[in-house]
Image: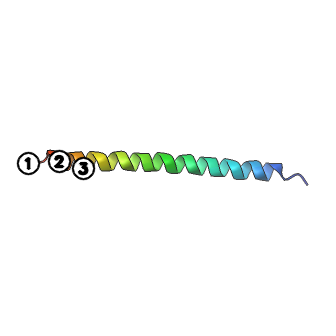
């Protein structure tokens, strides 16, 4: 039995999960920075 399809799938899931987490974290950081800037601008 050839194990390469399983190995390639595992790597694909890992890469997709890592990229998804990276994008989600970046978006959360941008939202938090925008909220912090909005608080600073309030009188």
What residue sits 30% from the left and 47% below the top?
Answer: 33
Residue furthest right as drawn: 1
Residue 25 image offset from top left, x and y in percent: 44, 50
Q: Residues within 10 Å of mark 3 (few under 14, many from 20)?
A: few
The label on residue 14 is none
First of labels 3, 1 by sequence position: 3
For residue 31, side relative to residue 24 (left or right) = left
**How many numbered discs, if any?**
3
Q: CA distance from mark 2 to mark 3?
A: 6 Å
Left-right relation of 27 to 8: left
Q: CA distance from mark 1 to mark 2?
A: 8 Å
* Tag 3 near tag 1, CB within 8 Å: no
Circle 2: element type: helix
Which class describes the residues within 10 Å of circle 2: few (<14), some (14-19), or many (20+)? few
Could you tell me how far apart the alpha carbons at marks 3 and 1 are, in whole angstroms?
14 Å
Q: Is residue 37 left or right of residue 7?
A: left
Identify the element where label 1 is drawn: loop
Q: Identify the residue at horizontal 77%, vertical 52% (top origin).
A: 7
Q: Are marks 1 and 2 in contact (CB under 8 Å)?
A: no
Mark 1 — residue? Answer: 43
What residue is shown with label 3? Answer: 36
Which residue is depicted at the point 91% across and 55% down?
1
Q: Residues within 10 Å of mark 1 (few under 14, many from 20)?
A: few
Q: Position of residue 36 (x, y in %)?
A: 24, 49
Percent from the top left, x then y, of residue 31? Answer: 33, 47
Residue 40 - label? 2
Residue 6 x/y as whole percent: 78, 53
Query: Does residue 28 appear to the left or right of 39 in the view shown?
Result: right
Cβ atoms under marks 2 and 3 closer than 8 Å:
yes
Q: How is the image coloured?
A: rainbow
């Amino acid at each position: 039995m050839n194990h390469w399809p399983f190995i390639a799938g595992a790597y694909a899931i890992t890469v997709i999960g890592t990229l998804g987490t990276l994008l989600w974290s970046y978006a959360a950081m941008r939202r938090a920075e925008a909220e912090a800037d909005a608080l600073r601008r309030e009188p």
